[in-house]
Image (cartoon, grey):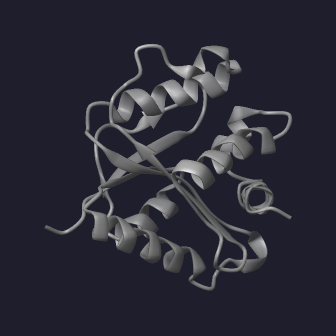
Amino acid sequence: MSAVETAVARLVASFAEDLVVQWLDLPRPEDLFRPLAQEASSVGRLDLDLPGTVALWLPDSGERATEPPSARLPRRLRSYVDAMMAAHSGRGPHVHLQFVGVTPDHRGRGLGGRLLTRGLARARASGTPVRLEASTPRSALLYARHGFVRTGADIRLPEGPTLIPMWWHPAP
């Protein structure tokens, strides 16, 4: 299995019960994850080196596109993409930690924290800030333990869950 397909399988398993993925109501969640895993593999960073884990780190210019690519997406996915773009535009270059997942059979072993530590070490070495959107208060606590701070207003998806925007800045 290719790295991208391994990432997609791990993402599907990791996010099967995630409120945002459920809200998106996509017939095939892998169709959400595959293009992002391909992008992370080609221009970002696709982390799969710990068992049952996956992280997609994508470079972001911090500029809002004048015509978002979301125009052709299903309604809820378009709402999600537009909300993310609006919440983080104008912040300058950074990395977007799009997804961090641990499959159910590997949870509770600290693997997600180890994956974050490794990725943040790379960001610190390059002096690059990182952003993410926590989908639960519990995940926001994990990210806060790794130095992420809440920033801006919560992102409320129409008739759906609320996301917590968070940023991490490398130490000077």
- Give the tally of numbered discs: 0
Place of residue 100 in the rendered image (x, y in percent of width and height, measured from the top left): 58, 61
Residue name at image x 73 percent, y 41 percent: 22
Image coordinates of residue 112 in percent, x first then y, are 56, 74
Q: Outermost residue toward the left?
A: 172
Q: Quadrant of the C terminus?
A: bottom left
Residue positioned most to the bottom: 109
Q: Position of residue 110 (x, y in %)?
A: 56, 83
52 or 148, nearer to the observer: 52
Residue in the image at 51% along x and 53% along y: 44
Residue under the point 26% across and 39% down: 92
Quick check: 141 left or right of 11? left
Rendering quarter of residue 54: bottom right
Q: Quadrant of residue 171?
A: bottom left
Name of the residue lying farthest toward the front: 42
Q: Where does the N terminus fall, quadrant-wise?
A: bottom right
**Quarter-of-image position of residue 147:** bottom left
Residue visible at 68% across and 77% down in the picture = 107
Residue 68 position, x and y percent, is 50, 19
Is residue 35 placed above or below 4 in the rendered structure?
Answer: above
* Above or below, comparing residue 109 to residue 32 in the picture: below
Q: Taking 43 as reference, is 50 above or below it?
A: below
Residue 2 in the figure: left or right of residue 44: right
